[in-house]
């Protein structure tokens, strides 16, 4: 019996050349982590990959674990 995949998620991967390209091509969900500046940068990179592969970035559900800023 053939199996189908209904949902692919990527968590924690933020490699800009491979991981985020694969997310743009295949994933339904992406979770990243780091400081706020890093997360903003990774989201921008993912958006650019989506543009390159012809995918609407809003199709990918995103979440982020953002490290608190020291007091």
Image (cartoon, helix red, strand yellow):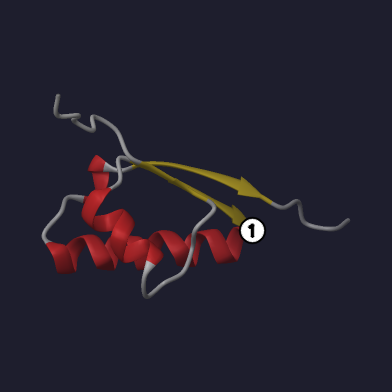
**Residue 42, percent from left and from top:** 46, 64
Displayed quadrant of residue 5: top left
Q: Residue furthest front?
A: 1
| Circle 1: element type | strand
Which residue is painted at 57% across and 66% down in the image?
Answer: 38
Q: Residue furthest top?
A: 1
Tally of numbered discs: 1
Left or right, residue 71 beside residue 13: right
Q: Does residue 1 sit above or below 9 in this rendering?
A: above
Left or right, residue 44 beside residue 24: right
**Residue 68, percent from left and from top:** 76, 51
Q: Residue furthest left?
A: 54
| Picture quarter with the N terminus | top left
Looking at the picture, tell me which residue is in the foreground, 61 or 71.
61
Which residue is painted at 30% across and 40% down in the image?
Answer: 28
Left or right, residue 9 beside residue 14: left
Displayed quadrant of residue 3: top left
Which residue is painted at 49% across and 58% down in the image?
Answer: 13
Q: Does residue 63 sit above or below 34 in this rendering?
A: above
Instruction: Please name the residue that numbered disc 1 is placed on.
Output: 34
**Residue 67, percent from left and from top:** 71, 53
Left or right, residue 35 beside residue 57: right
**Residue 54, percent from left and from top:** 11, 60
Q: Residue furthest right?
A: 71
Looking at the picture, tell me which residue is in the foreground, 52 or 40.
52
How packed mark 1 is, by other alpha carbons closer than 10 Å (few <14, some 14-19, many 20 or more), is some
């Amino acid at each position: 019996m053939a199996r189908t995949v209904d949902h692919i998620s990527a968590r924690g991967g933020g490699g800009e050349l491979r991981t985020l390209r694969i997310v743009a091509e295949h994933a339904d969900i992406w979770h990243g982590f780091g400081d706020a500046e890093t997360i903003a940068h990774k989201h921008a990179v993912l958006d650019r990959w989506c543009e390159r592969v012809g995918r609407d970035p809003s199709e990918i559900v995103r979440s982020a674990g953002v490290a608190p800023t020291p007091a």
